[in-house]
Amino acid sequence: MKILNLNSFVALIFILGACNEKSKSKSTSEELIGFKQWAATPPMGWNSWDCFGPSVVEDEVKANADYMAEHLKEFGWEYIVVDIRWFADNQTTGHYNPYDETDFIIDEFGRYMPSPKRFPSAANGAGFKPLADYIHDKGLKFGIHIMRGVPKEAVFNKMPIKGTNVTADQIYSTEYECTWLKDNYTIVKGKEGSQEYYNSILDLYASWGVDYIKVDDLSRPYHTDEIEMIRKAIDQCGRPIVFSMSPGATPIDQHEHAKNNANLWRTIDDFWDNWAQLNYSFTMCAKWAPYITKGAWPDADMLPLGKFIRGERATDRYTNFTKDEQYSLMTLWSMFKSPLMFGGNLPDNDEFTNEIITNKEVLYVNQHSENNKELYSKDGMTVWTAEDPANGDMFVALFNNEGDGFVKTKDLLYRSGTVSHLTDGFGENIDVKLPEGTTELYLIVNDGGDGHSWDHADWINPEIELSTGKKIKLTDLKWEYATAGWGKVSINKSVSGKELNVKGTVYKNGIGTHSKSIIMYQIPDNSVRFTAFAGLDKAATDVKGGTTVEFMLATQDPTPRNVDIKKALVNTGRISRRIAPKGKELEADITGADKLYLVVTDAGDKFNNDHADWINPTLYNDKGETLSLTDLEWTSADSGWGKVQKNKSVAGKTLTVAGKTYQTGIGTHSNSVIVYDIPEGYTKFKALCGYDDEVKDAADGVTMEFLVYTENPVLNNSKSIPIHLKELGFEGECTIRDLWNHEDLGTVSAEEFATTIPTHGAGLYRISGTRK
């Protein structure tokens, strides 16, 4: 621990006049009184958590502030928030450093200070004031994250509480200690010095110029006493500081207390970029919609969009959400009036990402609409409505939530059913025969349908038995890929890095993971049986909350695709750094076809680093004449990242597969569909297919499959979603405007309006007309 004595440095001075003047401003409605004025509309900003985890440094914060000021401020984006553990000198990426391996920076009054190693401008006791000034000079606002409670370092060292004769060891309790980060102890309300400690840290933050504070481990479980102490501390500090409570799910029966103390509070646990979590968010947003209040906002959590650098669950990759899912995310968050906190590294934003976060018409819905609610949700269709208080127009959002989510369940080999704390032994014994010729085995953990918080799951003693009687531990094999909804899949450890422990029994052999997990193994073709005990890890069952999962097995790829695999003329199968690393030659008979579809999928493991090359893609006719596809213009070309490139990789570099460079080819990225009109007379297509060497050393991903079609392969799960405008009070003719496309769709009768929405996609419309 490093103690900073502020009295030995230049005193920090701040002026309260402007702050007090702001707090006296006339409220825009009866609700906007007191602290609610400070977040009159849902806050919009950037937070370092998704992108950098607990390890962000000053230059990275400034780079995001610079980008926001130049590109996003005009659209309402204004907060720059430094997330967790900015006071740790030696914080690494991924998991937090254990408490006893962390170098804390703390002042003589037991208050965390920013690490000068990571934030050089904080040296000499300056704290975050220089960084806040930098951000304020750009017309933006500055926020920080803290943990509930008092630092253990302050308690153990009996550090004085500023302005009192009390020391930190006199205000704490070990009860209700945070289960996932062990830095702090609970502060006991009513003890002399308790309120004063919270006052002292908020006074410090006010002196730095903090505009926003995110307080963690506060609302699940719900810590009423400390919430009230923090509210008082903010109110006495003399500066308007927006108060955000985290994580979720905040108990819905505490909505009144939350509204009376905080500006925003979380509705769910940490939200990441997978469809299952987004689909679950529809349920939670609908439940919380009646409690949306100006200045006090239910918070659906951050926007996991753009590129993540070294986050807790994402390293050097772009969001896993498809473009349609990104539309759904932004549409739901806007209709729900959730705060908007962008999670990716802003300087890495691509054109599409900027388009969806700078659409003024959509952001208007988030900032200014009223009476927001779910109208109905059934048969995979969800409809939300809201009103424009300026003119009485209606906003209508249509969502198509149907389609395969995490895995396809039709052809699974085994399903455990829901495993929870109500399951005997907290787990299930698995003993299944494998079909003859099985060469692939997929170990799957899904959530139990309640979201995936604390779903730590263990595959204990997983083994395959061969026809010879020999048994092989899966932990002795190398998986082809392994994904988890939180943390990283671990061998012989739990997903939290501890010993495997199910209901108090410790196991030496197994695999620790977390729901939303698929682990894929290549196994010998004479494998005949799989056995394991699948259970809930004690690290999760010790925590009050969800922990419900389902264990599954599959012997063929269970992950959904956006194309019909069975219709492909040819298919490379999976290509990765372990399977076909040199690429594969494809040859397809296209006799009589007039269309050619070149498809690259993510092979089911999401599309991280799937830079795919079609090398020397060539058409042949019966005379032996050839035509390179690079000499033709495609009729359409979609890439899951970047843009399809001719004679270059998707990153714009020389095409390179397995160490060899090529002058002719097409560079793209899963998921990709490229369409050509085939000139008359050509009967054959050939190409070498492989991943580009520019991603051979990527941290993860680089798995894909190449397919060739002569008919449209894209699965059509689009839905026509109707809305009866009369039920919304409209009479006569109405005009419809598509807000995402900035397009007037014309006039319709008030009988019914319907439009087609793609799978996992959304539409958002402004409806104008005469209403009863």
Image: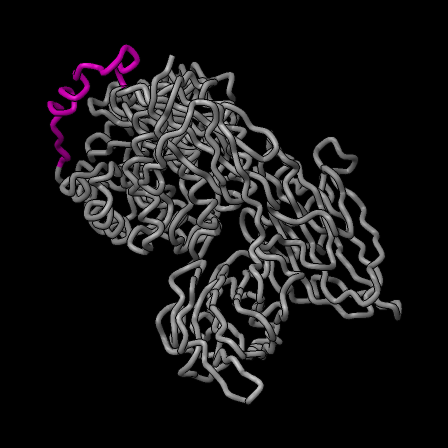
Q: How many marks?
A: 0
In screen coordinates, is 342 left or right of 628? Answer: left
Q: Is residue 56 above or below residue 756?
A: below
Q: Nearer the viewer, residue 391 or 279?
A: 391
* Observer-nearest of 377 and 105: 377
Residue at 38% over, 33% down: 765
Here the colouring is one colour
Q: Is residue 459 above or below residue 333?
A: below
For the view shown, which residue lies furthest in the bottom direction?
Answer: 624
Q: Which residues are magenta?
A: 11-36
Q: Position of residue 182 (x, y in %)?
A: 48, 39
Q: Who is closer to the viewer here, 100 or 346? A: 346
Q: Residue at x 66, y 56 (%)?
A: 492
Spot occupied by residue 418 in the image (x, y as percentages of width and height): 72, 37
Residue 688 position (above or below residue 199):
below
Tell whether 465 sits left or right of 736: right
Image quarter of residue 79:
top left
Residue 35 coordinates in the image, percent (x, y): 27, 19
Q: Name the quadrant of the N terminus.
A: top left
Q: Is residue 97 visible?
A: no
The answer to which quarter of the image holds residue 143 is: top left
The secondary structure that dominates the magenta segment is loop
Picture coordinates of residue 479 (x, y %)? 64, 64
The image quadrant where one finds the C terminus is: top left
The answer to whether residue 186 is seen in the rendering is yes
Residue 568 lies within the magenta run: no
View extreme (top): residue: 30
Q: Nearer the viewer, residue 315 or 613?
A: 613
Above or below, 119 relative to 241: below
Q: Can residue 12 be found in the magenta stretch?
A: yes
Name the residue at 33% across, 27% down. Answer: 243
